[in-house]
Amino acid sequence: KQWYQRRVAITAGGNKALDVLPRTLSEHDVKLKQLVVYSVEKRREFDKDLSSLDVSAFQAVVFFSPSGVEYTADLLRERLSRTCVLVAFGKSTAAALSESFSDTFVIRICEHPTPSGVFDVLMSL
C-alpha cells in the first residue's frame, strides 16, 4: 500500500474552511482530519472604516476569501459604483462573489492565486 492509503493526515485551519480538500482526498482513500485552530469573524470597526472611504471612486475591490465577500457584500453592494470590478483570488471566492453580487458587477478571477495573479488582473482593467 502507498503511504496515503494507510495513514491519516490532519490540517490546521479556520472555522470557515471549505470541504474541498477532505472530499477530494477521501475520493482517493486518504483520511484527513481537520482541526480548527482559529475563528474567522467580522471586525466590529469594519463598517466605520468602510464609511470613512469614498468607495464610489474605486476601480476594483480584491477579495481573498468567501468570508470576505460574506462580511462586506451588503455594504459594498449599496456603495460601490457599478463600474467597479470585483476581483476574486480563487474559484471559491469567485463563486461567493457571483452569489452575493449576481449580475450587478463585473467579476474577474485571478488566473493564478498569487500576488502576480492579482497584479495581472488589475493591470488588465
Image (cartoon, rainbow, N blue to C red):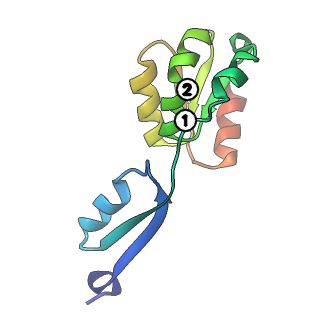
CB within 8 Å, label 2 to label 1 = yes
Image check: 117 left or right of 49? Answer: left
The residue located at (33%, 70%) in the rendering is 32
The residue located at (35%, 69%) in the rendering is 33
Q: Position of residue 9 (x, y in %)?
A: 38, 76
Secondary structure beneath disc 2?
Answer: helix
Residue 73 to residue 20: above or below: above
Image check: 22 left or right of 93? Answer: left
The residue located at (58%, 18%) in the rendering is 76
Residue beneath disc 2: 72
Residue beneath disc 1: 68
Image check: 40 left or right of 95? Answer: right
Residue sitting at the far front: 44
Q: Position of residue 53 (x, y in %)?
A: 75, 17
Secondary structure beneath disc 1?
Answer: helix
Residue 108 to residue 4: above or below: above
Q: Quadrant of the N terminus?
A: bottom left
Q: Position of residue 41 (x, y in %)?
A: 53, 40
Residue sitting at the far bottom: 1
Residue 58 to residue 120: above or below: above
Of residues 42 and 55, the one nearer the viewer is: 42
**Type of the residue with mark 2:** Thr
**Type of the residue with mark 1:** Gly
